[in-house]
């Protein structure tokens, strides 16, 4: 082979070794898995009766242990907690409207208008839920509460104002004052 042929041959080998000429990664994975299984079963085929029985017992034990572990994990994730809730835990889960309103005012005094919008809105929703006899759930969004609570255009206006304050471009004291005014109107209207 001449040096030019060797260079050409090396260049062609390099081209054929590139990713575009290899089989897809999924095909290579399955081929490797099948080869590994053939190797494993080839070695297991040479075992005697007792050795095969021991391997089967070990494999069955591992499978049983994995199944029990999965069952216990799944059972824990869907089963309700059987532990009694203390008074303090239930208080943490259900915030009170006055506490939330105080937090909103403290944040507003600090000039954190965006942060003040959420507790003020939650304070209103907690009070409205209590009056409507609906259990408070923190995971429910503001607009979902509007569909669960009795219809109210002022509540819709308050929700829009609070979200504009929380997510608008330039929140300020005037927007917070407007939310507080709407909050007071809703509380006076429903008292």
Image: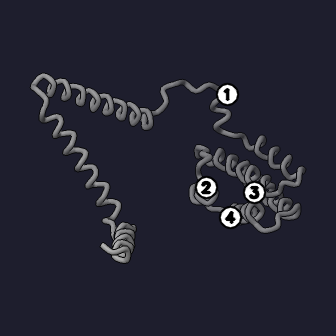
* Residue found at x 35% / y 72%: 6
**Which element type, helix, strand or loop, lies under badge 1?**
helix
Q: Along the polypeptide, which appears first: circle 2 or circle 3?
A: 2
Provide residue 143's location: percent of width, then percent of height: 61, 60
Q: Which residue is mark 3?
A: 186
Provide residue 121's location: percent of width, then percent of height: 72, 54
Nearer the camera: disc 2 or disc 3: 2
Q: Along the polypeptide, which appears first: circle 4 or circle 2?
A: 2
Q: Which residue lies most toward the left here?
A: 49
Residue 140 in view (yes/no): yes
Q: Which residue is mark 2?
A: 141
Q: Are marks 4 and 2 in contact (CB under 8 Å)?
A: no
Q: Which residue is mark 4?
A: 156
**Which element type, helix, strand or loop, lies under badge 4?**
helix
> According to the image, what is the colour scheme of the structure?
one colour
In the rendered view, tell whether residue 93 sits above or below residue 52. Answer: below
Q: In the drawing, does residue 83 fall left or right of residue 22?
A: right
- Which of 80 and 14 lies nearest the eye of the viewer? 14
- The image quadrant where one finds the N terminus is bottom left
Q: In the drawing, does residue 83 fall left or right of residue 181?
A: left
Nearer the camera: disc 4 or disc 2: 2
- Which of 108 and 6 lies nearest the eye of the viewer? 6
Q: Along the polypeptide, which appears first: circle 1 or circle 2?
A: 1
Nearer the camera: disc 3 or disc 4: 4
- Neighbor class of circle 4 (other Cα within 10 Å; few <14, some 14-19, many 20+) is some
- Mark 4 and mark 2: span between their CA atoms? 13 Å
**Which element type, helix, strand or loop, lies under badge 3?**
helix
Q: Are marks 4 and 1 in contact (CB under 8 Å)?
A: no
Q: Which residue is mark 1?
A: 88
Image quarter for residue 161?
bottom right
Q: Along the polypeptide, which appears first: circle 1 or circle 3?
A: 1
Q: In the drawing, does residue 9 fall left or right of residue 177?
A: left
């Amino acid at each position: 082979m001449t040096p030019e042929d060797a260079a050409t041959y090396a260049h062609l080998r390099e081209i054929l070794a590139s990713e575009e000429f290899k089989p897809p990664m999924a095909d290579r994975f399955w081929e490797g898995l099948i080869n590994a299984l053939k190797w494993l079963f080839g070695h297991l085929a040479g075992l005697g009766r007792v050795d095969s029985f021991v391997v089967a017992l070990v494999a069955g034990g591992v499978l049983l242990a994995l199944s029990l572990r999965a069952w216990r994990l799944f059972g824990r994730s869907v089963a309700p907690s059987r532990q009694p809730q203390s008074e303090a835990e239930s208080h943490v889960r259900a915030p009170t409207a006055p506490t939330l309103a105080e937090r909103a005012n403290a944040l507003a005094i600090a000039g954190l208008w965006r942060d003040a919008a959420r507790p003020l809105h939650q304070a209103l929703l907690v009070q409205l839920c209590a009056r409507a006899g609906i259990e408070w759930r923190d995971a429910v969004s503001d607009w979902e509460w509007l569909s669960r609570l009795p219809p109210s255009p002022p509540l819709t206006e308050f929700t829009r104002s609070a979200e504009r304050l929380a997510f608008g471009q330039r929140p300020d004291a005037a927007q917070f004052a407007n939310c507080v005014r709407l909050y007071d109107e809703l509380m006076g209207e429903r008292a």
